[in-house]
Image (cartoon, helix red, strand yellow):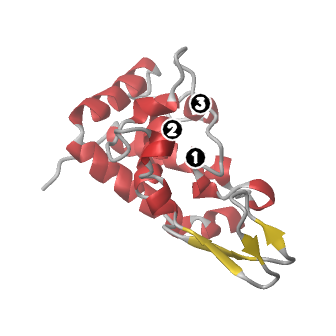
Amino acid sequence: ISFLMAGRDTTSSALTWLFWLLSKHHAVKKNVMNELEILNLKEKPLDVEDLKEMKYIKACLCESMRLYPPVVWDSKHAENDDILPDGTIVYKGNRVTYFQYGMGRIEELWGKDCFEFRPDRWFDDNGMLKMVDPYMFPVFQAGPRVCLGKEMAFIQMKHVVASILRRYEIKKV
């Protein structure tokens, strides 16, 4: 229950943005529907194994959260003096803030099409989901502060996406 409650606002925000993006990108929505069809999920109840197989939906969620992170900025306080990788000195007690919304739009990290909703960027040349550096995509934090509920959040979001899209047509009004 703690995991469900901890992620209620961020999960709903991520899903809202994804459904909005799918309403604008019909080819992507068609690919999502194709994945659901391939998994033969029309009538049967979803199970964990089905949810694990939803690679394209996970890529859509990652891409949506890259562009519209549920938490747009975050801060950390230095426990001790430290030096950032670029040489910036951070003194004990200083706050370091990072802007996830902006990080998802950095051309050097995401390419010239960094403003576009393109879930395919999350796949490698072999069609496998890429492992992206969590410091480049810090939606679930990184390092010792990584979100303990990350995988559960993906399972929940995939379940909601599949449950809604196999029953309803999403249209922008």
Q: Position of residue 12 (x, y in %)?
A: 45, 62
Residue 63 sits above or below residue 148 on the image: above
Q: Earlier in the sequence, mark 1 or mark 3?
A: 3
Local packing at callout 1 (Cα closer than 10 Å; few below 14, some 14-19, many 20+) is some
Badge 2 marks a residue whose secondary structure is helix
Q: Which residue is drawn at 34% across and 39% down?
A: 113
Residue 69 visible? The answer is no
Q: Earlier in the sequence, mark 2 or mark 3?
A: 2
In this rendered view, identify the residue nearer to me: 10 or 121: 121
In this rendered view, identify the residue nearer to me: 142 or 165: 142
Q: Which amino acid does label 2 sit on?
A: Lys
Whole-angstrom CA distance, mark 1 to mark 3, is 15 Å
Q: Which of marks 1 and 2 is nearer the N terminus?
A: 2
**Which quadrant, please, contains the N terminus?**
bottom right
In this rendered view, identify the residue nearer to me: 64 or 173: 64
Answer whether labels 1 and 2 touch (C-beta < 8 Å): yes
In this rendered view, identify the residue nearer to me: 87 or 141: 87
Q: Name the residue under label 1.
A: 154
Whole-angstrom CA distance, mark 2 to mark 3, is 11 Å
Q: Position of residue 122 (x, y in %)?
A: 50, 33
